[in-house]
Image (tube, rainbow, N blue to C red):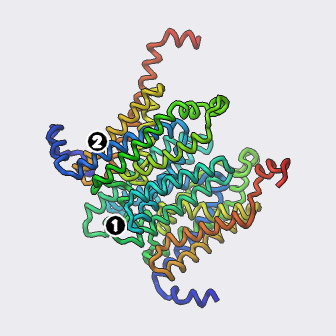
Amino acid sequence: MTLAETGAPDWSWNLLTDFQEMWSYPFMVNAFRAGAIVAVVAAVVGWFVVLRRLTFAAHTVSLVAFPGAAGALLLGVSAGYGYFTLCVAAALVIAALRGGGEHEESALTGTVQAFLLASGFLFTALYRGLLEGPQTILFGTFLGITSSQVTVLTVVGAVVLAVLALLGRPLLFASVDPKVAAGRGVPVRALSVVFLVLLGAATAEASQITGTLLVFALMVIPAATAQVLTARPGLSLALAVLLAFATTWLGLTAAYYWPYPLGFFVTTIAFAGYLLALGWRSLSEVPGRRAMAPTATREVPA
Amino acid sequence: MTLLMAVSPLSHPFFQHAFLAGTAIAAACGLVGYFLVLRAQVFTGDALSHVAFTGAMAALAFGYDLRLGLFAATIAMALLFGTLGRRARPDDVVIGSVFSWILGLGAFFITLYTSSRSTTNGTAGISVLFGSVFGISAGSAVVAALVATGVALLVVLMARPLLFATLDEAVAAARGVPVRLLGYGFLALAGISAAEATQAVGSLLLLGLLAAPAGAAVRLTDHPHRALALSAGLAVLEMWAGLFASYAVPRMPPSFAIMAVATAVYTATFLVRRPAHVSRARAAVPTGP
C-alpha cells in the first residue's frame, strides 16, 4: 500500500522540465543551493571523521544542535546561530574532555545526550511558534531556506573547506598514524582540536538540511560508502563528495514530489548506496579471486 | 511533610496515573539500567531508543496500538543484539548508518500517520519522541505498572546469577550458570523496559532514565547489591521529583524535569566522591592520590 503510494512518481521523467519546474520556485532553488554546499562540506569533513573514527563525536555534536536551534528560536535569534554556536562549543568540550577515563564514559554520555535532548524539548515546549513542533529541527526541512541563510552556509562552508585544504596533508598523516606523525613533529593534539571545531561547524550546516537526528546520513554514510569502494584517499574523498551531493539532490527532488520528510529520503538514499557498495564489494571480491587464481594459488597453496 | 505537599497533585487522576506508571517504570529502568551499565551495554539502550520510535510510529501508521509496535520492535532488537553477541561488536560506522536510517524511517512513518489520518492528533510523533507521562490513561497506566513491576521482579530474581555471569562469565559458565540464556533473558527485559520508558519519558530520552541513576549508583558504591537497590531507588525518586516539579511549573514538560533531576543527581555524584575504580586506583597507586 505504502509502496504503491511512494513508488508511483508523478513526474515526467524529462529531467530538464522537472528541474525547470522545481527551480521556478525560489525556495527550491535555495534548497538545492544549500543542499549542494552542505553536501560538499559535510562529505569532506565526514571523510576525515570516518578515517579518524570520530563517528561517536559526530553523533554527540549533532544532538547538541537540537537544543541549540530550539534555544536560539526561544531567544528570538535565527536558528542558524544556535546551530553554529552550540555545535562548535560542544566540539570544544569534547576536545577538552577527550582522553579521560573510559570506564564510566558510556553512562556519562548517555546521560548527557538525554539531557541535551530534554533541554531541546523544553525550549520547543516554551517556544510555541514552531509550526510542527520539534519535528522539523529533528528530521529536517527544506522549506523556508532564505537567501541570507544560503550566504551564511556558503561562507562557513568555504572557511571550513579552506582550513581543511591547508591542514589536509598533516591531518591525513595524523589520522592514519598519530604516533609516527607526532614523532615527525606534526602537532597532533592541536590538529585534533581544530578538526573537532571544523566538525562542529560542518555538523551545524548539515543539521539544517537533514535535521539533527539524521546528520549521520550526510556526514558519515557517503564517506563510509566511498571508503568501501576505494582505498585511495584522493579518489574516495572525491567519491564521498559526489555521493553526498547526489544523495542531497536526489533527496530534495524526492521530497519535492512526495509529501514525506527530507530526512527520510536522504537517509534512505544514503543507506541504500552504502548497502549497494557493500554488496558490490562482496560481489567483486568473488570473481576477483577467480580472475587472480594464479596469484591466489601462489599465495595459498591448497 | 512531603506527603502533605504531595496531596494536592495526587488528587488529580492524571497525576495518579502518571505517578503509578512512572514509579513502576522508573524502578524497572533503574534495575535494568544498572546491569546495562555494569555489562557495558549502554549502547544497547541507545539502539533500543531509536528502534522504539520507529516501531511505535510504524504501528500507528498501520493502525495498530502504539504499544504493540513499541514492544515488538524493542524486544526484537534486544534479541538481535543478543544473537550478535557481546564480543561481536559491529563497526560503529555500520551501526550509526543503520540507526540513522531507522530514524529516517520513523520520520517517514510519522508523516504517513499524520497525513493518512488527518483527524487524529498530529503530535503523536512528539509524544513518542519525548514522552507524555501526564497523558497516560487509567488503563494504560495499570498495564504499564504491571508490566514494569513484572520486569523489576524478574530482574531481582535473576540478579544473583546475572551478577555472577556479568562479573566473571567464564567462571559462571563453568559453575553451571546458564550464561547465554541469562544474557538473552536480560536483553529481552531491557527491551521491555525501553518500551515502557518510552511511554514515560519518550524514546529519545529513555537512555537517560536507564543510564543516569545506574551511573550514579555505580559511582556511589562498589557493593553490587547495594548499587542495584540504590539505582532503582534513585530512579524512582528522580521520577517523583520530576513529576512534582513539572506539576509545580506547568510550562516545564515532565520528561525534561525528570531528565534534569536525573542529570543533577548524576552530576552531584561527581562532587560527592572521586571515581575509585579498580583500574584507576591501581594506576594512581604509584603517584599517590
What residue is at 42 percent from the left and 25 percent from the top? A283
On the image, the x and y values in percent for residue B62 come to 32, 58
Q: Amino acid at mark 2?
A: Leu
Q: Which mark is residue A42?
A: none
Looking at the image, residue A153 sits to the left or right of residue B261; the answer is: left
Q: Which of the image's four quarters has the C terminus of chain A?
A: top right
Q: Nearer the viewer, residue A77 or B183?
A: A77
Chain at numbered mark 1: A
Chain at numbered mark 2: A
Res. A31 in view: yes
Looking at the image, residue A175 sits to the left or right of residue A81; the answer is: right
On the image, the x and y values in percent for residue B120 come to 29, 69
Which tag, 1 or 2, sits closer to the chain's start? 1
What residue is at 64 percent from the left and 56 percent from the top? B37
On the image, the x and y values in percent for residue B58 come to 36, 57
Check disc 1 and report the residue beneath it.
Answer: A130
Res. A271 in view: no
Q: Amino acid at mark 1?
A: Leu
Can you say whether A288 is above or below A117 in the image?
above
Looking at the image, residue B207 sits to the left or right of residue B282; the answer is: left
Q: Secondary structure at mark 2?
A: helix
Q: For residue B239, what is the image quadrant?
A: bottom right
What residue is at 43 percent from the left and 43 percent from the top? A159
Q: Nearer the viewer, residue B27 or A40?
A: A40
Q: Which mark is residue A250?
A: 2
What residue is at 61 percent from the left and 68 percent from the top? B264
Mark 2 surroundings within 10 Å by alpha-carbon count, few (fewer than 14), some (14 through 19), many (20 or more): some
